[in-house]
Amino acid sequence: MSQKPALTLYLAAPRGFCAGVDRAIKIVEMALQKWGAPVYVRHEIVHNKFVVDSLKALGAVFVEELDDVPDDRPVIFSAHGVPKSVPAAAQARNMIWVDATCPLVSKVHIEAERHHENGLQMIMIGHAGHPETIGTMGQLPAGEVLLVETVADVARVEPRDPEKLAFITQTTLSVDDTVEIVAALRARFPAIIGPHKEDICYATTNRQAAVKAIAGQIDALLVIGAPNSSNSRRLVEVGSANGCAYSQLVQRATDIDWRALEGIRAVGITAGASAPEVLVNEVIDAFRARFDTTVELVETAQENVEFKVPRILRHAE
Ligand code: SF4
C-alpha cells in the first residue's frame, strides 16, 4: 500500500504552446539550418527561459536591440511584434531579417493602420512596456495610439477628437477585464469603432476558459510559465478571480512551494502559451514523486490552428 497522500491533478486543456509560439520557434530552428550559427534574435523569441536556452544551445544569440546585431548575420524579430522602425532599420543596413511576429499580432497591426488611414486615432488596451504593446503602438506615428490599461485610465484618456476613435487590444489580455474596459470605452466614446469583441487571440481565450472550468474543483492552481509572459500571468489571475485562492506561477518543478501545498488534495495544472509540454510533464512527475497522484484531463476546446513560416524559409521545411 502506498504511503503517499492521495492527490488529484486536474490538467487543463488547451494549455501550453499556441500556433504563434510554435511557428516562432520553428523560424529560429529553420534559420539556423539555412544560415548556420550564429543567428541573432531580437528579444526573447517567446517568453520562456527553457525555450530560449534550448535555442541558444543550437547557436541562436539573443539581443535586445538591432544595434547589437552585426550587419552580416541574419536577425529574427520575436513573436510579440516590433515597431515599424525596426525592420526599416534592418532594411537600411541591408541585413537579412525574418519576422516571427505572430500572424494574430500582425492582424492587429493591420487593423491599426487601416483605422489610421481612415483618419481615426487609436486607443490600445494593453500593458505598458510589454513588447507586443510597444510593437503595436510603433506601427503608427507617435501620438496616434493612446494606451489604456484599466477602466480608470479610460476616464483619464484625452483623445484628439472623441468622434474619430477606434480601439485595438493586446492579444494576451484577461478576457473578463477587457470586457469591462471595452464597455467603459463605449460608454465614454459612443462613436468608437472596434473589433466585434476585442483582439484577444484564440489561444489566450481558450487557456483562460480551461482554467475557469477547473477553478471550482481545485485547492491550488499552478501555471507553468515565465514571469514576463503576459498570457501566463493572466492565467494566474483567472484562477484567483474564479475561486482558487492559491494560484501560482512556476517556471519549473523546482519552483513549487511544497509546504504551501501540504494537506491539499486537488491541484489544477496549466501552462502559458510559451511554455513547452516537457515542463508540464516535469511538474506532473514531481507530484507523482510526492503523492499518490491521479491525473484528470479537463478539455474545454480543441485547437488545430497552424501558421506557415515566412517564404524566405519555406524551402528548408
Ligand atoms: S498567444 Fe496568441 S497572439 Fe500570442 S503568439 Fe500565441 S496565438 Fe499568437
Image (spheres, rainbow, N blue to C red):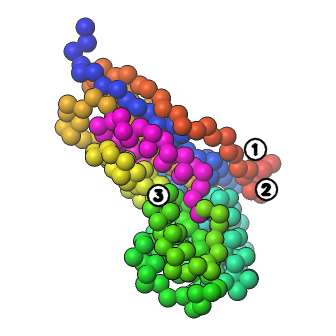
Q: For residue 311, which numbered disc appears in the image?
A: 2
Region rendered in magenta: 198-225
Q: Is residue 174 magenta?
A: no
Q: What residue type is labelled 2?
A: Arg
Q: Residue at 41% across / 37% down in the picture?
A: 214
Q: Residue at 25% across / 8% down in the picture?
A: 1
Expressed as whole percent of the image width and height from the top left, the position of residue 247 reads 32, 46
Q: Extreme bottom residue here?
A: 160
Q: On the image, numbered disc 1 is attached to which residue?
A: 317
Who is closer to the viewer here, 129 or 316? 129
Q: Which amino acid does label 3 sit on?
A: Asp
Quadrant hosting residue 280? top left
Assign a secondary structure to mark 2: helix
In space, the residues marked 1 and 3 are separated at their CA atoms by 39 Å
Between disc 1 and disc 3, the foreground one is: 3
Assign a secondary structure to mark 1: loop
Between disc 3 and disc 2, the foreground one is: 3
In space, the residues marked 2 and 1 are separated at their CA atoms by 10 Å
Q: Does the magenta stretch include residue 221?
A: yes
Q: Residue at 56% across / 67% down in the picture?
A: 169
Near mark 2 (Cα within 10 A), the count class, few <14, some 14-19 or many ≥20, is few
User: Along the polypeptide, which appears first: circle 1 or circle 3?
Assistant: 3
The C terminus lies in quadrant: top right
Q: On the image, numbered disc 3 is attached to which residue?
A: 176
Expressed as whole percent of the image width and height from the top left, the position of residue 119 reads 70, 86
* Above/below status of 56 relative to 182: above
User: Along the polypeptide, which appears first: circle 2 or circle 1?
Assistant: 2
Expressed as whole percent of the image width and height from the top left, the position of residue 48 reads 46, 51
Who is closer to the viewer here, 7 or 136? 7
Q: What residue type is labelled 1?
A: Glu
* Above/below status of 135 relative to 62: below
